[in-house]
């Protein structure tokens, strides 16, 4: 078998979409599994759509996600340059080859000529209004003009494009690893432009030439490129590279979470989740978008989630590290059907990966955040907080968001809990409990519990009846992690002071 060489070939026209990360991931998994090479090629031949900063953004995003590139703009490599704008000469040389072999031709038509052709076609009732085998002989091109006329037009600086001459009456068959056999009649295809009037190649020419020169073995890309694949096959054949054709795999679309259709940035904005891996500010509109990284998604969780959008291992196992994905991945197990983008599933993965982290690791997230709040916290306290909170959080920032009460006494109390649970019994128990705690010489979760049970037993009030009142007095909230651990973490003095404050300020609701 040929060496596995795959490429991710984004165009730097904006931030990388999350679907692009999945495409890059599948390429990377195959490369690593087969001991192959992962290439990053920047397809920047469309100068009108070039967005400054997009290229760096793409590379930074892949690096954050843990998708390592072996050959590319930053890494270099034996098949460079890896930026298409630096390969212009190569493409024009290959376009010349097609002109000489009769597979391509010059076309001088103006916009008005093209419009007139479409009108003529419409008038004949044809549903084909393309520049194709049906119309090319009615146009101004090197097939209809003499060699002499053609040369003159070029020499006098007439703008021209180079078009591919689609063969007539052929069936193009391609074997897609995901879709199986795909076949198209050449009569359906138009004579695509290969070289534009600005001397730049189009996507099709540059993409095929580079895949060939870079010895790409598998083209794994989004389904939106499937309609271009027959043209690419014809280009390979026209160049005489038929036996070096890569294998194709067109990945299923990522679908909206609700309903049908392709997932768009608009859907993500509407439903309040990121569409880009990292924060991005559009340099033209100045619009800012939050990335998965900044929203608190762990790269390993996002990768695990993305891997399952279109692929499955055929077992029940859902948690896969990158190395496990590399082992288990196979193109054969990629589905044909579009994959619904379920952000809840991404959050579930994030929860699983956060839980699996050690308290020490999680504590660094918390301590970093506390620095921003100007709060100092011992490592020991931070680890204890992580230990009690980690089953409850979805994002690292939740350690702070949902655990502020570990550092600050509540500024307000949950009204619902107060009105239901702050009653005579609660006040009686908590007053006695506060006094008992104050007298203790050592204090931890077990002692806090034992003391509480002694108090409730002596007052003959069920402990369960006053627990929520105690919780709201200490944290301001009706729910949260283990109450005895909260007391151990905030410490005896704080328990006493918070209870005193609550007892002085909370009113029993009458009636
Ligand atoms: N430049 C194309 C894109 O932006 C590459 C498609 C392909 O992989 O062939 O997705």
Image (tube, helix red, strand yellow):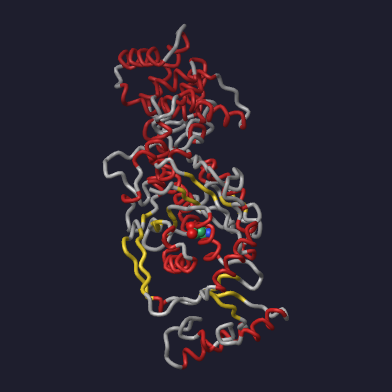
- Which x, y percent locates residue 475? 47, 29
Q: Residue furthest right?
A: 156
Q: Residue shown at 52%/53% (left/top)?
A: 214
Q: Is residue 266 visible?
A: no
Residue nearer the viewer, 347 or 278: 278
Would you identify the image quadrant in which residue 392 lies?
top left
Q: Residue furthest bottom?
A: 123
Residue nearer the viewer, 184 or 121: 184
- Which x, y percent locates residue 236? 46, 64
Left/right of residue 331 with respect to residue 91 in the rendered view: left
Vertical side of 250 occupied by 111: above or below: below
Residue nearer the viewer, 132 or 296: 132
Residue nearer the viewer, 177 or 403: 177
Q: Residue shown at 64%/65% (left/top)?
A: 48
Vertical side of 94 occupied by 290: above or below: above
Quadrant containing the C terminus is top left
């Amino acid at each position: 078998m040929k060496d596995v060489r795959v490429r991710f070939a984004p165009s730097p026209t904006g931030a990388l979409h999350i679907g692009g990360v999945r495409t890059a991931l599948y390429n990377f998994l195959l490369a690593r599994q087969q001991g192959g090479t992962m290439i990053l090629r920047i397809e920047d031949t469309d100068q009108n759509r070039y967005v400054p900063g997009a290229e760096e953004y793409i590379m930074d995003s892949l690096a954050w996600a843990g998708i390592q590139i072996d050959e590319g703009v930053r890494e270099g490599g034996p098949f460079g340059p890896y930026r298409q704008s630096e390969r212009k000469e190569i493409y024009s040389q290959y376009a010349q080859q097609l002109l000489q072999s009769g597979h391509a031709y010059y076309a001088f038509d103006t916009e008005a000529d093209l419009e007139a052709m479409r009108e003529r076609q419409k008038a004949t009732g044809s549903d084909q209004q393309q520049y194709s085998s049906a119309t090319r002989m009615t146009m101004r091109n090197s097939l209809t003009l003499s060699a002499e006329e053609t040369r003159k037009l070029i020499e006098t600086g007439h703008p021209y494009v180079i078009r591919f001459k689609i063969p007539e009456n052929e069936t193009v068959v391609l074997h897609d690893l995901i879709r199986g056999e795909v076949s198209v009649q050449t009569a359906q295809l138009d004579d695509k432009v290969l070289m534009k009037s600005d001397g730049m190649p189009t996507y099709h020419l540059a993409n095929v030439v580079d895949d060939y020169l870079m010895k790409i073995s598998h083209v794994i890309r989004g389904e939106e490129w499937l309609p271009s694949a027959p043209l690419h096959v014809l280009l390979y054949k026209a160049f005489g590279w038929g036996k070096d054709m890569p294998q194709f795999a067109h990945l299923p679309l990522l679908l909206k979470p609700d309903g049908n259709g392709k997932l768009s940035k608009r859907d993500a904005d509407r439903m309040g989740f990121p569409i880009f891996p990292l924060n991005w500010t559009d340099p033209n509109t100045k619009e800012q978008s939050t990335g998965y990284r900044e929203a608190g998604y762990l790269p390993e969780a996002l990768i695990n989630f993305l891997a399952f959008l279109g692929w499955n291992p055929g077992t029940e196992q859902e948690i896969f590290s990158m190395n496990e994905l590399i082992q288990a991945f196979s193109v054969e197990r990629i589905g044909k059907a579009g994959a619904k983008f379920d952000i809840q599933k991404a959050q579930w993965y994030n929860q699983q990966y956060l839980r699996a982290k050690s308290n020490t690791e999680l504590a660094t997230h918390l301590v970093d955040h506390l620095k921003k709040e100007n709060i100092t916290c011992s490592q020991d306290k931070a680890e204890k907080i992580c230990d009690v909170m980690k089953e409850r959080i979805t994002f690292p920032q939740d350690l702070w968001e949902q655990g502020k009460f570990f550092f600050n006494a509540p500024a307000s109390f949950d009204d619902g809990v107060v009105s239901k649970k702050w009653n005579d019994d609660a006040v009686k128990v908590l007053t006695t409990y506060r006094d008992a705690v104050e007298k203790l010489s050592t204090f931890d979760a077990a002692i806090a519990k034992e003391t509480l049970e002694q108090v409730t037993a002596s007052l003959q009030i069920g402990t369960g009846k006053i627990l929520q009142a105690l919780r709201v007095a200490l944290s301001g909230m009706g729910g949260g992690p283990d109450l005895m651990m909260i007391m151990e973490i905030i410490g005896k003095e704080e328990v006493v002071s918070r209870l005193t404050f609550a007892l002085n300020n909370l009113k029993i609701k009458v009636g």
